Image (cartoon, grey):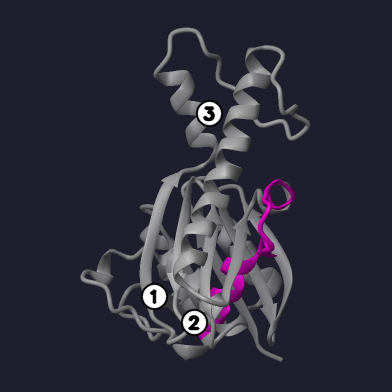
Amino acid sequence: MQTTLCLDFGNTRLKAAVFRDDKPETILTIEKEDKATFEKILSDYQPDYSILSSVINHQQETETLLNHHTRFHRLHHSSILPFYTPVSKPETIGADRLALCAAATHLFPDSNNLIIGLGSCITYNFLNKNRQFLGGAISPGLEMRFKSMHHYTALLPLVKMDWNFPLIGYDTKTNVLSGVAWGMAKEIDGIIEAYEEKFEGLNILLTGGDTLHFAPLLKKRIFADPHLMFKGLYAISLCNR
């Protein structure tokens, strides 16, 4: 039985998943990026392999530690991938988007796929039935919308998400909640519709920390999996061994 540690360093959170053979066994939230934290993770789970997707300026010491204790791979544009990237500047593709496309390739290898990642930003990632990642779109995520409304106005407060929000807001807070949440949901529905007009048999995959909250707000049928990123990282780890 082989163990793989999959690490996702995003703008908001550091997360990890431990795979035993082909199945995710444990999902971890990493509170602090320091040597002691990773030494404990390596000691607890004894991974044979590790892979890192990072969109932040993480510490080089982390890579050194992983490389010393495991067969380590840092995901980047020149990694061996189960799909193609025929875009003008493949080196600019975020590691998180590569992982999401790898997961879609594994799940729906011969289909057109639109993979939507809910994070600090919303990423729309289009992978066609020929396994070509053609790009997509990026727009502000949930927290970014709350923060920008507070920052660029004199009186609007900084609102924290409460999923028990009404359609019709009855005070400032609930007006902001309704506007942000329903605005995002309708944006996502609208982009899905635009892709459906161009591509037949389109699969919609939704992932990210707020997936289970957002899925019921969408009118389109979707494949929702909060841990799609880790499944893609695992698939890429297999390609690069």
| Residue 184 horizontal/vertical position (percent) | 56, 41
Element marked by disc 2: helix
- Residue extent of the magenta highlight: 214-237
How far apart, in angstroms, are the residues tagged by discs 1 and 3? 31 Å
- Please state which amino acid type lies under the numbered disc 1: Phe
Question: Which one is closest to the eye, mark 3 or mark 2?
Answer: 3
Numbered mark located on residue 59 in the image: none
How far apart, in angstroms, are the residues tagged by discs 1 and 2? 15 Å
Numbered mark located on residue 236 in the image: 2
Question: Which one is closest to the eye, mark 1 or mark 2?
Answer: 1
Query: On the image, which quarter does residue 47 sit in?
Result: bottom right
178, 36: nearer the viewer: 178
- Please state which amino acid type lies under the numbered disc 3: Phe
Q: Residue at x 50, y 42 (%)?
A: 141
Please tell me whether residue 160 belongs to the stretch shown in magenta. no
Element marked by disc 1: strand
Crowding at mark 3 (Cα within 10 Å: few <14, some 14-19, many 20+): many
Which residue is the site of mark 3?
Answer: 146
170, 38: nearer the viewer: 170
| Residue 191 horizontal/vertical position (percent) | 49, 54
Q: Can residue 48 be seen?
A: no
Element marked by disc 3: helix
Q: Can residue 195 be seen?
A: yes
233, 225: nearer the viewer: 225
Instruction: Classify the position of the N terminus by image quarter.
Output: bottom right
Please tell me whether residue 232 belongs to the stretch shown in magenta. yes
Viewed as shown, does residue 173 lie left or right of 56? Answer: right
177, 15: nearer the viewer: 177
How far apart, in angstroms, are the residues tagged by discs 3 and 2? 34 Å
